[in-house]
Amino acid sequence: MNEQLQLDFDKIIKTLKISEKEIQLKKSFLKKFINNGFPNKKQEDWKFLDISQIIKKNISDLSFFNDYSLTNEIDPSIFISGLEHNKIIFINGRIEKIDFNCEDQNQIEINDEIEKNITFDYKNSLIDLNNAFNNKVFKILVKKNYSLKKPLIIYHSTNDKINSKNVNLSLNFELEENSSLRIIDYFSDNSNKNFVNILYNFNLKKHSILKNYKVDKFRNNNLNYSFNNIEQDDNSISETFILSAGSDYFKNEVNCNLNGEYSSAFINGIFSLKENQQHEIRSSINHLVENTKSYQLIKSVLGKNSKSAYQGRIFVNSKAQKTDGYQLSKAILLDETSEFNAKPELEIYADDVKCSHGSASGSLNENSIFYLMSRGLSYQQSKELLINGFLLDVVEKITDLEIKNLIKNIIGLKE
Amino acid sequence: MDTREKDIEKLKDYKYGFTTDIENIKAPKGLNEDVIKFISNIKKEPQWMLEFRLKAYERLKLLKEPNWQKPKYPKIDYQDLYYYSAPKSMKDKPKSLDELDPKLLETYKKLGIPLQEQARLNGIAVDAVFDSVSVATTFKGELTKHGIIFCSMSEAIQKHPDLVKKYLGTVIPVTDHFFATLNSAVFTDGSFVYIPKGVKCPMELSTYFRINASQTGQFERTLIIADKGSYVSYLEGCTAPMRDENQLHAANVELIALDDAEIKYSTVQNWYPGDENGKGGIYNFVTKRGLCKGKNSKISWTQVETGSAITWKYPSCILKGDNSIGEFYSIAITNNHQKADTGTKMIHLGKNTKSKIISKGISAGFSDMTYRGLVDINTKAKNSSNYTQCDSLLMGNKCGAHTVPYIKNKNFDSNIAHEATTSKISEDQLHYCQQRGLNSEEAVGLIVNGFCKEVLQQLPMEFAVEAQKLVGISLEGSVG
């Protein structure tokens, strides 16, 4: 595989118009990746779902080269209707369009000549892979006191031109003081057996608000990996919602550093999995100063042969007194072949904190089904109603009304 | 000097910190085939036992010391340890208590072990382990009447080779992890218990461990077999005198419960934790594992861990038989520079198996405490359930408390519930107690004992009192 990597890397370098300095930087990332390879289950963070095995099993000859010099046609049918929005469109990992038509153009800056050096600590070879192979990295800056009127929808779509490819894309966001941004990551895939690797880096200044909703709804055979790094200053709020239901494999990682006082982070997630799907959410919330807050709620509904994993970590620094941290993960196993794994972890070095976690898993409650059936519902209807209620709980946590309704429609949940 | 300072002064002197001056027989320093043969030879072991050890040693050579744990420690030089040391006067085993070396008896007296009169009064049969050789076994007569075998491991190898051969290494195989395999290769002595069919052991069986000679790793091997329909409660208490170098303790404990049998295993561990600067202390790297082999069997672990510089152990239950039950109750207290990484593993293999985990962690001073647990419900373990509760209490902001549970549910008929909280003693509670005339230390003691109540209740009476006192002593000087 290493030869393939080197070969594809040389091809990429030829097609990209980048400076010598950048080439050197990319080379160093490639070297790091070649040294470490794909993560495997020997690493604690990959214990439950071993990506190197999954890639081996699903993609026989993974190649890393994409020709980013060719444009792709945008298929308008993928757009979400009924909601005015700004767009960023990725097709096969290439940015085809950035459109902030709904906004005041002076308040948003889009920059593509940014320093690509990673500023946060990580032990994750997929980030190296991303940095070595990604095409253009844009930085989107929302200026002081500006709140975007409409949400930004980032379309992640692939078409049938690519197959067995590794696609890497990366975006940076900076929210200046008192600004706010809502992002929906919307996945729609028309391709097979690709490995998509997404890296977002958010920098939240004082009083800013970020809401990120990830919607992976449509069944496809791709493998996805997404890493969000969120740095938060005083009084900032980040809200992440993950619907993990479409791809064969999807691992969402959120690393959140609460660097400023009174900052808070919320992560809510739904797994709704069927045949042969394997999904994971791994969160790491680092409470680094006083009076910070975090809340996580993850629910899974697992069908035949599916597997979900949740690894949540709350870290509380010795300085971070008055921390409030909470994690809850629940799972319903519908079939004897489904599997749920959890590792809710607390690492606490301060005494005046309130941290707790809970985890529960089991089958649907027979008594509840009986109750509903005694009121005239069929077995199937009762099951559906119970699952509906179970998942609705998470969607109700979404603070943005417009988007809450949109997501309810997408999932097909009834009130 | 006010009382608080005095109390701290008192704490500096470890109550059990004395060494008894007895000449030791030691194996040559280091770990190699010759040392293993020496141990086997001096204990007059049969060939199969030597082969068992050598097989483990072969395996050990391929293994690496694990390093995923939270508390890190300086590298142990395994060639710099003595693997066998026995008091010289033990060469010819005494027949009764009167023949014991008076110095040995004095050591036990200082520890407050009820070896003689007290033992009879309390109805406890004691199999005391002094360094590596079992000193004396009391209450043999009473136990023999019921057909119960309670003796040292070396004696069992001589007298009951069939039982030992059949069960030794079935729960912790020689191919296990580094420390367990090390133990299999060089273990010196330990307790052996066999409860025959349908017998309820009429008294609590008990062992006290003590680590005496410096630079000796103590490698105990305990094997408890409860045959069909039997019941036994086993107590283990541990203390070690003050030593500057860190001493390694890597024991293996295997429990086997057959159909309808129940084993209750309680530990109170207050080995030397090192001084207030974290110098010295015991490394307690113990492998404890129970196998619920038969239907309707039950194994229950209760532990109170207050000592040792580093505690690193996970008493586990393998629930193989249908309807079997595993329980784990734990209190772990760390103070000063102590570190603990402890918890349990519940592996559900049989149908309708149940497990319950209650873990209470208290950390004070500069200490670090981790609960690490695994609940694994296998595909075939239909209708199983687990309940886990782990609470941590922090005192001061120099210490840490961590919870790392691993939850694996592969069976849709089964339920797993897990809860964990971390908090500190609330000002309100303290204020309430102080208002009623308790000083702050007594108040903390009371609150902590309340916090631990669920676990303390599980201990046999004699232990519960001792444990309650230990909880208080361990936390002295940490309030403020």
Image (tube, helix red, strand yellow):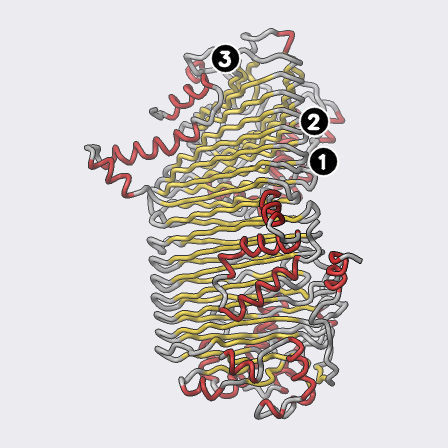
Determine whether label 2 and label 3 are within 8 Å by CB.
no
Nearer the camera: disc 2 or disc 1: 2
For disc 1, the marked residue is A28
For disc 2, the marked residue is A116
In this image, A376 relative to B363: left or right? left
Mark 2 or mark 1, earlier in chain: 1
Residue B57 appears in which quarter of the rendering?
A: bottom right
Q: Amino acid at mark 1?
A: Ser
Percent position of residue A217, x then y: 42, 28
Distance from Cα at disc 3 to Cα at disc 1: 38 Å
**In which quadrant is the N terminus of chain A drawn?**
top right
Q: Residue at x 46, y 72 (%)?
A: B233
For disc 3, the marked residue is A85
Q: Mark 1: which secondary structure?
A: helix
Mark 2 or mark 3, earlier in chain: 3
The chain carrying label 3 is: A
Crowd around label 3: few <14 · some 14–19 · many ≥20 (10 Å)? many
Q: Residue at x 57, y 8 (%)?
A: A103
Q: Amino acid at mark 3?
A: His
In this image, B144 relative to A168: left or right? left
Task: Confirm whether circles 3 and 1 share one chain.
Answer: yes
* Residue closer to the observer: A190 or B366: B366
Q: Amino acid at mark 2?
A: Lys
User: In the rendered view, would you say B470 is above or below B233?
Assistant: above
Crowd around label 1: few <14 · some 14–19 · many ≥20 (10 Å)? some
User: In the rendered view, would you say B109 is above or below B255?
Assistant: below
Mark 3 or mark 1, earlier in chain: 1
